[in-house]
């Protein structure tokens, strides 16, 4: 009967080894038994950027990149986007099950009563230049939150963990909204506990000069769907950053600030901002062929932003839902003229051998920026709109890491390529 093992022959020594296969993996640490002699450290696996390395076991989000499948705790993203809300999905991600009516009410109440931030935070915001990037402000103020909640260091205590997770989910919209208001030179709007999570956020961002301002229900719904789609995505760059930093048992605010820093990058969450700048640069459908040519020639490392994915080698299921949401939003805001460029860009790319051979399809960031722009958000605020919903993913993955008995402080090895054993040379003799 076939064994779940890998038979390995080390041709350097002709020794044979049996490595256990579990969950489609071998344990990298088992490679260390393969040695050329007693002094040999043993084999390691070399995997820059962790292209083929599982760094954890997780029950939160399942992705099948070839089939374009995304499930949160087993529920297909398409069903959650159609039938659920971001707060209900947040409960699902954190607790593993959809909430009962009472559980959802209690959870919503907890989040709602933690939306305020300490008044001192406004002084942090006021300290930034008028043109500071909102993600820089967000990451800095989230890191600063750890100084307001020293008890958060007690990461092994579930009640303490859950309180900080609730605070982070609840305060991220407030901090993001404050950063926007600072950039616009507008007074801060405080959270309104009578409003739902997403409507409250929109009101803190958009309300001016009246307490009667009300967000359009279709825009609240569309943004809530976008929040659902961005909530978690298994071991992406920013979640890995949160897990790695959190593995030192630092507080979750500091670990989440690391996630925000990673998301800020243009290859990750910063891509939605980069897509809009790309569409603005193209300017007109007639310029697309020239732009595509530059991308294929890798002219200045130009990329088709919003395309490609480390895992999805098929259409990102989130991009499909977002493309549908465009229609509802544009009915209210008027059609975004850049939609035509995006649709034509996608049409050309999906038939061009360069992109097809590299399995480059639209990802979550390709269409989301069109909605954000149509809703009147500044381009540099787009990534903050990604960070708000991804907060529940970061804190849930962080807690799973903290409570995983197999996890330790992350400390990878290296292949040393530098010089060894050199004697010090006095400065007068250096040349
Ligand atoms: C997110 O990981 C997640 O789950 C992330 C995310 C989440 O929810 O957390 O899904 C959110 O970050 C989505 C991705 C957003 N980023 C972008 O849209 C930026 C543009 N995309 C690329 O930078 C790229 O596709 C990545 C970073 C997304 C993935 O890069 P990989 O897996 O490292 O692939 P690669 O760079 O090795 O590319 C393989 C080939 C290369 O060509 P060759 O060297 O073989 O000739 O494809 C090319 C790349 O040059 N390529 C692109 C391209 N993406 C890859 N060429 C043009 N345009 C692109 N967008």
Image (spheres, rainbow, N blue to C red):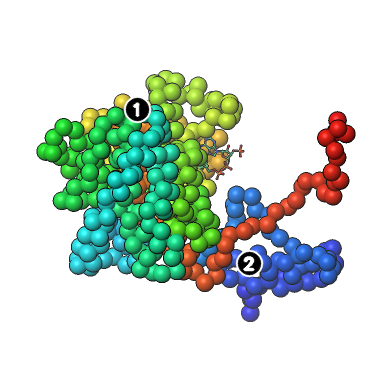
Whether residue 360 is situated above or below residue 14 in the rendered picture: above
Q: Does label 1 or label 2 sit earlier along the sequence?
A: 2
Task: Please determine whether, in this image, residue 56 is positioned above or below residue 215.
Answer: below
Secondary structure type for disc 2? strand
In the rendered image, the residue lying farthest to the bottom is 1
User: Which quarter shows the N terminus?
Assistant: bottom right
**Residue neighbourhood size for the residue with mark 2, other residues' Cα within 10 Å, grouped as few (<14), some (14–19), many (≥20):** some
Q: What's the residue at 78%, 46% (across, down)? A: 418
Occupied quadrant, residue 211: top left
Residue plotted at (32% across, 67% down) = 97
Mark seen at residue 338: 1
| Nearest to the observer: residue 68 or residue 369 | 369
The residue at which mark 2 appears reads as 26
Residue 81 visible to an observer of this rendering? no
Is residue 167 shown above or below 181?
A: below
Which residue occupies the extreme left position in the image? 212
């Amino acid at each position: 009967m076939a064994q779940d093992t890998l038979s390995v022959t080390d041709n350097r020594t002709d020794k044979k080894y049996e490595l256990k296969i579990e969950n489609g993996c071998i344990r990298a640490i088992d490679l260390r038994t393969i040695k050329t002699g007693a002094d040999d450290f043993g084999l390691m696996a070399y995997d820059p950027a962790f292209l083929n390395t599982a760094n954890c076991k997780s029950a939160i989000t399942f992705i099948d990149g070839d089939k374009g499948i995304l499930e949160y705790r087993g529920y297909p993203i398409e069903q959650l986007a159609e039938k659920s809300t971001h707060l209900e999905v947040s409960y699902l991600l954190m607790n593993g099950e959809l909430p009962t009516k009472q559980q959802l009410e209690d959870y919503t109440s907890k989040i709602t009563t933690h939306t305020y931030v300490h008044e001192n935070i406004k002084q942090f915001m006021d300290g930034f230049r008028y043109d500071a990037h909102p993600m820089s402000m967000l990451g800095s103020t989230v890191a600063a939150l750890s100084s307001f909640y020293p008890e958060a260091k007690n990461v092994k205590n579930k009640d303490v963990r859950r309180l900080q997770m609730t605070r982070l989910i609840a305060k991220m919209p407030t901090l993001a909204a404050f950063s926007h208001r600072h950039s616009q030179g507008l007074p801060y709007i405080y959270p309104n506990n009578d409003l739902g999570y997403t409507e409250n956020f929109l009101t803190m961002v958009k309300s001016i000069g009246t307490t009667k301002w009300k967000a359009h229900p279709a825009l609240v719904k569309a943004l809530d769907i976008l929040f659902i789609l961005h909530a978690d995505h298994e071991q992406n760059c920013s979640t890995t950053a949160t897990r790695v930093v959190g593995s030192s048992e630092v507080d979750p605010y500091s670990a989440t600030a690391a996630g925000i820093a990673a998301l800020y990058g243009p290859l990750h969450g910063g891509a939605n901002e980069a897509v809009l700048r790309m569409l603005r640069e193209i300017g007109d459908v007639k310029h697309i062929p020239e732009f595509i040519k530059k991308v294929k020639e890798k002219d200045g490392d130009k990329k088709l932003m919003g395309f490609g994915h480390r895992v999805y080698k098929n259409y990102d299921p989130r991009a499909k839902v977002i493309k549908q949401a465009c229609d509802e939003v544009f009915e209210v805001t008027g059609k975004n003229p850049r939609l035509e460029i995006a649709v034509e860009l996608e049409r050309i790319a999906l038939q061009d051998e360069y992109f097809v051979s590299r399995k480059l399809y639209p990802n979550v960031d390709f269409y989301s920026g069109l909605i954000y722009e149509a809703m009147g958000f500044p381009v540099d605020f787009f990534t903050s709109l990604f960070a708000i919903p991804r907060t529940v993913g970061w804190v849930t993955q962080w807690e799973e890491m903290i409570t995983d008995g197999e996890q330790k402080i992350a400390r990878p090895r290296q292949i040393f390529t530098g010089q060894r054993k050199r004697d010090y040379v006095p400065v007068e003799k250096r040349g």
